[in-house]
Image (tube, helix red, strand yellow):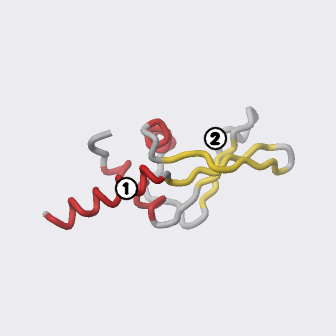
Amino acid sequence: MKKLTLSQSALLTYFANGGVVEMCTTVCSQLGATNFSAERPEQFSKTVLYSLVKAGLLKTVDEKLVYGLRWSRLMITERGLKFHEAMEAQRASI
């Protein structure tokens, strides 16, 4: 992934600053529900989240069962941190 959209950049920054998202992955009425470790990022979209996972910038690090529902925890990868640092360095040089 060479360039991120504004939404992708904002969500990657959320994760780079220590943000974590838990997502329900059990097939039920809660499928896709999200819980955030900090304040929910502005203009959050699951499509943007999925694109960052697909690009290898985010990954599932943990799964737990809560009342029979499986919740997957998503965090930034090492590749995502390096990409974010490069993105910030590029912004600073402008």
Q: Earlier in the sequence, mark 2 or mark 1?
A: 2
Label 1's element?
A: helix
Please tell me in which quadrant of the rendered image residue 2 appears: top left
Label 2 – label 1 distance at C-alpha? 28 Å
> Measured from the top left, where is residue 15 in percent x and y?
48, 59
Please tell me in which quadrant of the rendered image residue 25 appears: top right
User: Are there few (<14), some (14-19), or many (20+) residues within 10 Å of tag 2?
Assistant: some
> Measured from the top left, where is residue 4 in percent x and y?
31, 45
Q: Quadrant of the N terminus?
A: top left
**Horizontal arrangement in the rendering, residue 88 relative to residue 76 (left or right):** left
**Horizontal arrangement in the rendering, residue 62 relative to residue 76 (left or right):** right
What count of labels does the image hold? 2
User: Compared to 28, does 36 lie above or below?
Assistant: below
> Measured from the top left, where is residue 87 in percent x and y?
28, 56
- Residue displayed at 35% across by 57% down: 84
Q: Residue furthest top?
A: 27
User: Are there few (<14), some (14-19), or many (20+) residues within 10 Å of tag 1?
Assistant: few
Label 2's element?
A: loop
Which residue, given by chain and number where applicable, does mark 2 sit on?
32
Q: Which mark is residue 62?
A: none
Between residues 88 and 24, which one lies in front from this camera angle?
Answer: 88
Which residue, given by chain and number where applicable, does mark 1 sit on?
82
Q: Say if mark 2 contacts mark 1, CB within 8 Å.
A: no
Between disc 2 and disc 1, the foreground one is: 1
Q: Quadrant of the C terminus?
A: bottom left
Between residues 14 and 54, which one lies in front from this camera angle?
Answer: 54
- Dot 1 amino acid type: Lys
> Measured from the top left, where is residue 66 in percent x and y?
82, 51
- Dot 2 amino acid type: Gly
- Residue displayed at 57% across by 58% down: 20
